[in-house]
Image (cartoon, grey):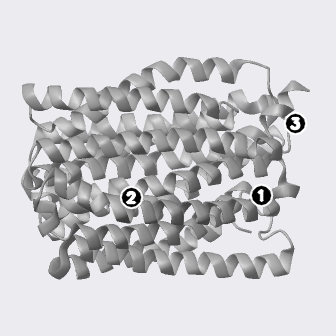
């Protein structure tokens, strides 16, 4: 059957490779984009723009998580019912994205002193949340539909357009050129991919065998949607919002340093996140192989992340000092080292969380992420005031170490008890 070839253990690393290459391309182009931004704008001005971008990306990731995670876990498992499932997801997505955009806009212009009361920034944030969350949902849908190979080209083109727009906007408009370049390029990707995805969804080809009934999948969708948004908001949302917190509780220069290093170091996460997302899809369609897939993914992810971290520790500090000597005086080397350590530690949680989602069990990640969401802001506020960007980096390291440690212990205990490392449970955790 030709449909089976798109799903299962044999496609795990092929799809992971497509997503990893897509993410690496995005990460490298993103690093180039931020390097160009650092060259064009002084730290104090760039810090405000990175804080606004942090709100857009953090809210967008959280908004997209509910539908995106439901798509990756359920679409490969429902066979011909994917049309109804996809449509339900789209309806729910646009409602929550609109609400999230308005809330993020209000919070930004109320809490960030430098843009307080700005209607223009509020509109920029609201539209940015819609666009960024839409492209994240589209990416999840492509993976769930067995079209992960489309992502590298789409992200490569988007990244190049973004870099090309930045100097043009900086010369002609200047006002929040970083955010505008990002959003214009991303909007183009959303407009192009939307109709293409609908065409794939409506086709009757390449369907894997159903492992869930239509009624069961639709019944699980709402619970999965709500818990995924909560779990993502408590983890990736808080994590991605950290540049905003550093700017708000330290100053724009420290915020710019943290945001630049954070964006560069995030390239270390791309392999793990790509392999984890592929693990969700393929372990969902082949649950008997889930544990062996997860173990292999974890080993490879740790090794690749450590190698990448050593590379960045050597090259990133002199590169940022070359762009602007002020970053050297702000302590860039130590910030790079600590944030690289965060990425290495995070690999354990990333793979563990993917294994839970592949079995439609998001209750455990949700509980762990509540603790993370409480710890991180408290640590950031405590450490950023006296230590700036370095304090923010150590806050991330402490919170992530606690989260990954708990995930590792949970995995070992449940593996010994259940044989598969995770129970097959409902989204309610019962």
| Farthest residue, direction right | 1
* Labels 1 and 3: the sequence-earlier one: 3
Residue 90 position within the rendered picture, expressed as x and y whole percent measured from the top left: 55, 32
In three-dimensional space, the C-alpha distance between marks 3 and 2, rounded to whole angstroms, equals 39 Å
Specify whether 363 is left or right of 257. Answer: right
Residue that carries the numbered disc 2 in the rendered image: 265
Q: Is residue 385 above or below residue 131?
A: below
Q: Nearer the viewer, mark 2 or mark 1?
A: 2
Residue that carries the numbered disc 3 in the rendered image: 209
Q: Is residue 358 visible?
A: yes
Residue 413 position within the rendered picture, expressed as x and y whole percent measured from the top left: 75, 82
Residue that carries the numbered disc 1 in the rendered image: 293
* Tag 3 secondary structure: loop
Specify whether 375 is left or right of 165. Answer: right
Specify whether 305 is left or right of 420. Answer: left
Q: Nearer the viewer, residue 239 or 359?
A: 239
């Amino acid at each position: 059957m030709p449909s089976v070839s798109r799903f299962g253990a044999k496609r795990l690393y092929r799809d992971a490779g497509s997503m990893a290459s897509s993410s690496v391309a995005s990460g490298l182009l993103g690093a180039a984009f931020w390097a160009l931004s650092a060259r064009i704008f002084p730290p104090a001005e760039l810090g405000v723009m990175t804080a606004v971008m942090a709100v857009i990306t953090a809210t967008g990731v959280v908004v997209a998580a509910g539908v995106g995670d439901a798509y990756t876990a359920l679409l490969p498992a429902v066979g011909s019912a994917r049309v109804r499932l996809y449509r339900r997801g789209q309806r729910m997505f646009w409602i929550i994205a609109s609400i999230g955009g308005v809330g993020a806009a209000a919070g930004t212009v109320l809490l960030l002193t430098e843009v307080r009361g700005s209607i223009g920034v509020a509109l920029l944030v609201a539209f940015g949340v819609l666009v960024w969350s839409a492209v994240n949902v589209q990416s999840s849908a492509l993976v769930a539909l067995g079209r992960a190979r489309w992502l590298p080209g789409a992200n490569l083109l988007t990244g190049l357009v973004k870099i090309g727009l930045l100097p043009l906007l900086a010369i002609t408009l200047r006002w929040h050129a970083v955010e505008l370049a990002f959003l214009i390029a991303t909007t183009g990707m959303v407009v192009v991919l939307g109709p293409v995805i609908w065409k794939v969804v409506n086709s009757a080809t390449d369907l894997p065998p159903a492992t869930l009934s239509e009624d069961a999948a639709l019944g699980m969708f709402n619970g999965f949607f709500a818990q995924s948004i909560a779990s993502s908001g408590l983890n990736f949302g808080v994590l991605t919002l950290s540049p905003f917190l550093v700017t708000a509780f330290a100053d724009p220069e420290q915020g710019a340093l943290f945001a630049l290093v954070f964006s560069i170091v995030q390239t270390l996460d791309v392999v793990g996140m790509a392999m984890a997302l592929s693990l969700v899809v393929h372990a969902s369609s082949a649950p008997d192989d889930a544990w062996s897939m997860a173990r292999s993914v974890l080993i490879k992810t740790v090794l690749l992340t450590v190698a990448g971290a050593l590379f960045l520790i050597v090259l990133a500090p002199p590169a940022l000092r070359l762009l602007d000597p002020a970053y050297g005086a702000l302590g860039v080397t130590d910030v790079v080292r600590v944030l690289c350590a965060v990425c290495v530690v995070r690999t354990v949680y990333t793979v563990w969380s993917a294994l839970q989602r592949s079995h439609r069990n998001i209750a455990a990640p949700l509980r762990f992420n509540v603790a993370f969401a409480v710890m991180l802001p408290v640590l950031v506020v405590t450490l950023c005031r006296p230590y700036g960007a370095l304090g923010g980096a150590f806050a991330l390291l402490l919170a992530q170490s606690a989260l990954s440690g708990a995930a590792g212990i949970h995995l070992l205990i449940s593996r010994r008890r259940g044989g598969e490392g995770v129970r097959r449970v409902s989204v309610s955790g019962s």
